[in-house]
Image (cartoon, grey):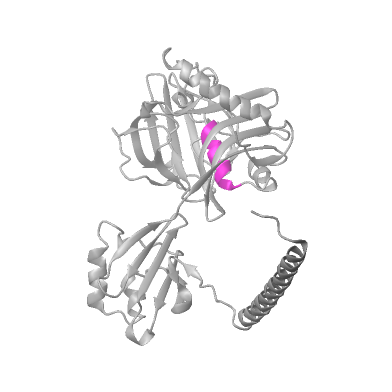
Amino acid sequence: MKNLPWKSVSIFAGVLLLAGAFSFFQIGQRAQIQTALSAHEKEELGAFPVKIPTIRYGFAVDTFQVVEGVIKPNEFLGDILSRYNVPYPNIEKLVQNAKGIFDVRQFRVGKPYMVLSKDTTQGADHFIYEPSVYAYYVFDLKGAQKVRKVERPITHEMRVSAGKIETSLWDAMVLNGLSFDLAARMEDALQWSVDFHHLQKGDEFKLVYEQNIIEGQEVGVEQVYAAYYKNFDTEFYAIYYDHPEDNKSGYYDLEGRPMNSGFLKAPVKYSRISSGYNPNRFHPILKRRRPHLGTDYAAPYGTPIMAVGNGVVTKAAYTRGNGNFVKIKHDDTYQTQYLHMQKFAPGIRPGVHVKQGQVIGYVGSTGLATGPHVCFRFWKNGRQVNHLKLNFPPPEPLPAEDLPGFFKVRDQYLEMLNQIPANETVAQNTPET
């Protein structure tokens, strides 16, 4: 390219400057126009806000007339739908279509439902029944009249918690912001080793567990994986081991011994000892000294009574003193008896085999009883004894080939338990790894 004369360069530069100025003016004008339009658009949007629909059970409920209620005693599907102009032939078809999905006879009192209608004069369009937070059922009342189950997605969080007993386990849970479900799961894990009827102020506990969460809400505990309890100077551990063979999955102590091979500490949950084993007790009804060779667990009427160990029912009968009672032979050494039942559990009769933890009856006050409780009696070699003072021989541990896998799991949970601050109330998510 040849060199241009300086005058030409000056003119060319001037043209470029003029063009640049014009371009800058255009850009500025466009920016002002865009700013003005944006402000106008914002003003329009402010005047006419976009309405976000309210979604419940998968429906935009703003587009329906909504009626909510709860199932009342002796109320059935037909009773509810007939109030919303759903013809009986349609109800019968729904009942048929629900087979294999939901038994319409299983509506539970107090559970919520919702009715959605586009036009109430033409009958309801949808009926939703929610028996639990985990799932709900949608009855489509128009068209094909289908019934479907919708399960809410569940997320799981590994958590740790700890606390100290001041009055009771339940109070400790409440003070820590923990759930009763977690307390019950903790009792399940340690029920073979810890006597929850004799907790002491200052007792400590630590837990590793998996929390279920639905739509941001805690909805129950999936599993307690490790539990620690300290009573005075005695420490108790329960480690959950998910064994490859399902029949071996369960709680083990630190040496790999199964915790469910002995006897439960008590036949009833969430109870209190109202009268202990006493060879010289004054009987509250007979008004005289009479040995009380059992332990009374007071609990509300209808509380389930569990067999404390595997065995065979030898008696299930009624007497004036015992009321309704069940006696179980566990082996050639041990027998147990459960008195004053309100009623027997279905199928409980002499000769029936029962498993540890199986419900055999319900708390009542039949026979010589002043209130609802179960008198629990324990025989060893034909003599009644105080079961709370018995020491049973430890069970055999897992087979040698299973121990390495168990020890690996045990050590992981022990590390998590040891990281929880001692003597300190905590409830938190476990750190991500």
Residues drawn in magenta: 179-190
120 horizontally vs 301: left or right: left
Residue 425 is situated, as x and y percent measured from the top left of the image, at 72, 39
Whether residue 42 is situated above or below residue 340 in the rendered picture: below
User: What residue occupies the far top of the structure in this picture?
Assistant: 400
Of residue 278 and residue 125, the one placed in the foreground of this image is: 125
The residue shown at (68%, 75%) is: 26
The residue shown at (49%, 25%) is: 259
Of residue 134 and residue 336, the one placed in the foreground of this image is: 134
Residue 3 is situated, as x and y percent measured from the top left of the image, at 70, 55
| Quadrant, the C terminus | top right
- Using the rendered image of the protein, determine whether residue 262 is visible from the camera's viewpoint: yes
Residue 135 placement: quadrant? bottom left
Whether residue 89 is situated above or below residue 299 in the rendered picture: below
Whether residue 427 is situated above or below residue 92 in the rendered picture: above
The kind of secondary structure the magenta stretch mainly shows is helix
Of residue 340 and residue 27, the one placed in the foreground of this image is: 27
Whether residue 97 is situated above or below residue 297 in the rendered picture: below
249 magenta-colored: no
The residue shown at (74%, 63%) is: 9
User: What residue occupies the far bottom of the structure in this picture?
Assistant: 121
The residue shown at (48%, 68%) is: 55
- Using the rendered image of the protein, determine whether residue 198 is visible from the camera's viewpoint: no
Of residue 193 and residue 390, the one placed in the foreground of this image is: 193
Number of labels in the image equals 0
Residue 99 is situated, as x and y percent measured from the top left of the image, at 25, 60
Residue 252 is situated, as x and y percent measured from the top left of the image, at 50, 24
Residue 41 placement: quadrant? bottom right
87 horizontally vs 183: left or right: left
